Image (cartoon, rainbow, N blue to C red):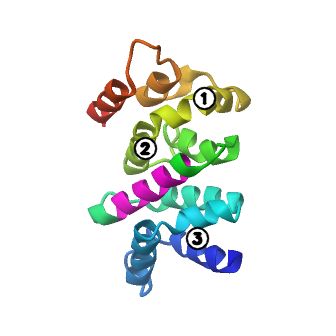
Amino acid sequence: MKDVFQLIVSSFENLHDQSSRSYNKRVLILETVAKVRLCVVMLDLECDKLITEMFQHFLKAIREDHPENIFSSMENIMTLVLEESEELPVELLSPLLASVKKDNDEVTPIAKRLGEKVFANCAEKLKPYLMQAVESLHISLDEYDSKTVTLVCERDSSTSWAQIYLICLELL
């Protein structure tokens, strides 16, 4: 089963290439993974490295001219993985954090938007892990361009998660 997931994840690497003969097949695979929640099976099989690789592929492959269904499928998969994970290791959060880091020339604006949207969707789940991840990466909160990360990390008890979510959506 892990070999099948390896093939699936590797197909996401070239999702940016819309001129490829395999592009429509890659999109269909992406939509299927999102629709049938195959990423949950990946979690059950403890395919942590593959999941991290999948996040990296999504953030590198997403393009402004992609149809909305590609963005939403990626967002749904990433959100589902984070929400369904028992623990969120730094390795999994690292690609997301990199997508919203200031002065990261490797990240496109749409990839940044995807990262921010996933942060907003998973704010409550991420809070206990996010500060730990930021500290272990030796990066200050000031180095993140995204107010989403700061809002999640610095949330106090007087601010509801619903308010954080709405603020994050306004920022997007």
Measuring from the top left, give residue 126's x and y in whole percent. 54, 35
Q: Amino acid at mark 1?
A: Pro
Chain-order first, disc 2 or disc 1: 2
Tell me if label 2 and label 3 are in contact, CB under 8 Å.
no
What residue does disc 1 label? 128
Of the 4 image quadrants, the one containing the C terminus is top left
Q: Which residues are magenta?
A: 70-82
Rendered residue at 55%/25% (across/down):
143
Query: For the residues carrying marks 2 and 1, which lies nearer the camera in this image?
Result: 1
Q: Quadrant of residue 135?
A: top right
Measuring from the top left, give residue 83's x and y in whole percent. 51, 47
Report the number of discs: 3
Q: CA distance from mark 2 to mark 1?
A: 22 Å
Measuring from the top left, give residue 11's x and y in whole percent. 54, 76
Along the line of sight, which residue is nearer the eye, 119 or 85? 85
Q: Tag 3: Cα neighbours inside 10 Å, few (<14), some, or many (≥20)?
A: many
What residue does disc 2 label? 112
Residue furthest out toward the bottom: 21
What residue does disc 3 label? 9
- Answer whether residue 68 is visible to the viewer in this image: yes
Q: Left or right? Give the position of 73 relative to 78.
A: left
Query: For the residues carrying marks 2 and 3, which lies nearer the camera in this image?
Result: 3
